[in-house]
Image (cartoon, helix red, strand yellow):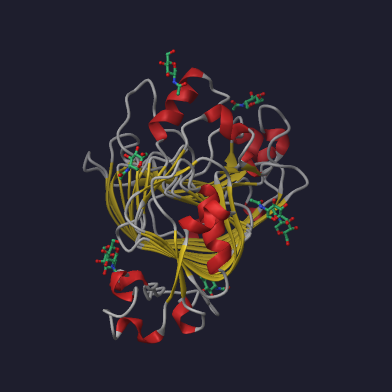
Amino acid sequence: MAILSTLITTIPLLATAFAAPNQGHYGRLPKDLIAPHVQALPYAPTNFRPAVPQRQHGHGKVCTVQSGSRDAGPHIIAAARKCNHGGTVYFPPGDYLIASAVDLTFLQDIDFAIWGNISFLQDAKYWETQTFQYNYQGAKFFWRFGGTNVNIYGSGKGVIDGDGPYWWGAMANDSTTQRPILFGTDGLHHATISGLTMRNPPNWFNLIANSSNILISDLSLQVDPQPKATPAKNTDGWDTYRSSNVVIQNSVIVNTDDCVSFKPNSTSVIVQNLSCTGSHGISVGSLGQYIGEVDLVEDVYVYNVTMANAGNFARIKVWAGAEASADGLSGGGMGSVRNVTYDHLYSDSNDEVVTLTQCYYSVNQTMCDRYPANLEINDVTFKNIWGTTSKKYDPRVGSLVCSSPEVCHNIYASNIHLEPPSGNDATYTCVNLDDSDLDINCV
Ligand SMILES: *[C@@H]1O[C@H](CO)[C@@H](O)[C@H](O)[C@H]1NC(C)=O
Ligand SMILES: *[C@@H]1O[C@H](CO)[C@@H](O)[C@H](O)[C@H]1NC(C)=O
Ligand SMILES: *[C@@H]1O[C@H](CO)[C@@H](O)[C@H](O)[C@H]1NC(C)=O
Ligand SMILES: *[C@@H]1O[C@H](CO)[C@@H](O)[C@H](O)[C@H]1NC(C)=O
Ligand SMILES: *[C@@H]1O[C@H](CO)[C@@H](O)[C@H](O)[C@H]1NC(C)=O
Ligand SMILES: *[C@@H]1O[C@H](CO)[C@@H](O)[C@H](O)[C@H]1NC(C)=O
Ligand SMILES: *[C@@H]1O[C@H](CO)[C@@H](O)[C@H](O)[C@H]1NC(C)=O
Ligand SMILES: *[C@@H]1O[C@H](CO)[C@@H](O)[C@H](O)[C@H]1NC(C)=O
């Protein structure tokens, strides 16, 4: 404890600090240390309440984490404990190596100003026994954030670097290598996450789990090009799970898997003004994979997104009845996809732009028709979509495949203008749905 306390300096931050920058320690604090005012625009869920910056109600402490130690983990935890209830944990520019799991699920009224570069010990064997582990998709965290009223911001300076090439290399050697998610929330409520650069995650970039009223803005997510033998793997930008009232906006993502993915029980989620390159699109699901489970994705609005060189753009994936799958065990889960809208999408050379399937992983359409999904899809809109596709499925630009009209209602498509490279008219595959609400060329 004695060692820790010397590494954390506590500086009272008074309201007058910025008015009189040369008094005491205050002059040395970066002017922009206070949490930026980020707002969900142009859309926000009803009753959306992300965090209030601490200066508005805190005791005003700053707890500085020193860079360059062999393991920043304990220092980060100590700083967060010291500055909890109204203070700011500050990472000055420099390198922070996290070499032990960091549990920050006790947070209450606290800000994190990250101006440095945070990375994690490159030791897959060691982390195997150290990470926070979850049942859902084998998710693992190096560190996790939970609590209430929290701002985490990099103001364009902070970097969270996953050193992905190490992990993808380890995976090429041993496919069972466990790879943690770069940034995780578990039970975080009323929070903003902004202004950070995230690079080369071992696995997904972000998992927002058990959380609500989260505003994510002005992030840059980047996967660097990799050698063929050690490709980047599972680098989803954001996955939301058991979370509601989430806004993800104003960010640029270059990756190799889903740009955003709405996993089970994601409700009232808005995605707006993103630029995604190289991804698998903005996906609902997959849902309904497990018999006996109930998956909900409801009230999702995806607006003003540009997507380039991706496999898919707008995509909804639901498993058919279990009997329709090759193993007879996967699929057949219950639940619903309801009120999902994709609006103002700009497509640059993506393979398929509009995709809805309720026959995910079914061996074939005959089997899917015979054993339709238990998970219903209702009120899905694809509208105001422009741009080009790649030559992969030319002239097809979309497919809307339900397993039965009984479990797939109110699917709308309108004002879609996509140009396949051949110059032929764009076509869509449409199966088992009422096409009277579809202003597209179903073939
Ligand atoms: C961050 O630190 C890690 C580990 O030292 C290093 O590999 C990485 O290049 C750094 N990233 C940036 C953007 O400085
Ligand atoms: C993978 O194996 C190669 C060859 O044996 C080795 O050089 C490399 O260090 C290994 N990478 C990891 C991350 O274990
Ligand atoms: C979410 O909450 C549930 C129920 O409390 C818990 O079992 C689970 O571990 C939490 N985290 C994740 C990522 O699922
Ligand atoms: C959209 O996001 C980009 C990239 O983050 C940002 O530069 C731009 O200001 C955002 N536009 C709006 C209207 O917020
Ligand atoms: C849509 O995104 C573009 C590019 O990021 C941005 O310039 C524009 O202002 C956004 N439009 C709206 C209405 O938010
Ligand atoms: C999702 O919500 C439904 C309805 O509340 C619940 O039955 C189900 O267990 C939840 N699923 C998960 C994965 O939390
Ligand atoms: C559909 O979802 C959007 C976005 O969350 C929401 O604003 C709207 O009120 C929802 N509509 C209905 C009918 O629930
Ligand atoms: C679909 O798959 C089933 C089960 O494998 C097979 O019996 C059937 O012949 C297939 N039908 C078509 C049209 O391929």
Quadrant in which the C terminus appears: top left
Counting every numbered tag in the picture gives 0
Task: Please name the residue shown 55% across and 44% down the image.
Answer: 142
Q: Which of 206 and 377 lies nearest the eye of the viewer?
A: 206
Q: Position of residue 175 (x, y in %)?
A: 54, 22
Q: Which of 71 and 413 lies nearest the eye of the viewer?
A: 71
Q: Which of 8 and 256 lies nearest the eye of the viewer?
A: 8
Residue 240 visible here? no
Task: Please name the residue shown 46% across and 30% down the image.
Answer: 167
In the rendered image, the residue lying farthest to the right is 292
Q: Position of residue 293 (x, y in %)?
A: 74, 49
Instruction: Give the side of residue 311 with respect to residue 175, left or right.
Output: left
Q: Position of residue 216 (x, y in %)?
A: 44, 63
Q: Quarter of the picture for ligand 7?
A: bottom right
Q: Position of residue 199 (x, y in %)?
A: 36, 44
Q: Quadrant of residue 194?
A: bottom left
Task: Please name the residue shown 35% across and 36% down the image.
Answer: 393
Q: Quadrant of residue 274?
A: bottom left
- Relative height, residue 14 to residue 411 (above, below): below
Instruction: Give the side of residue 228 with respect to residue 387, left or right.
Output: right
Q: Which of 146 and 72 lies nearest the eye of the viewer?
A: 72
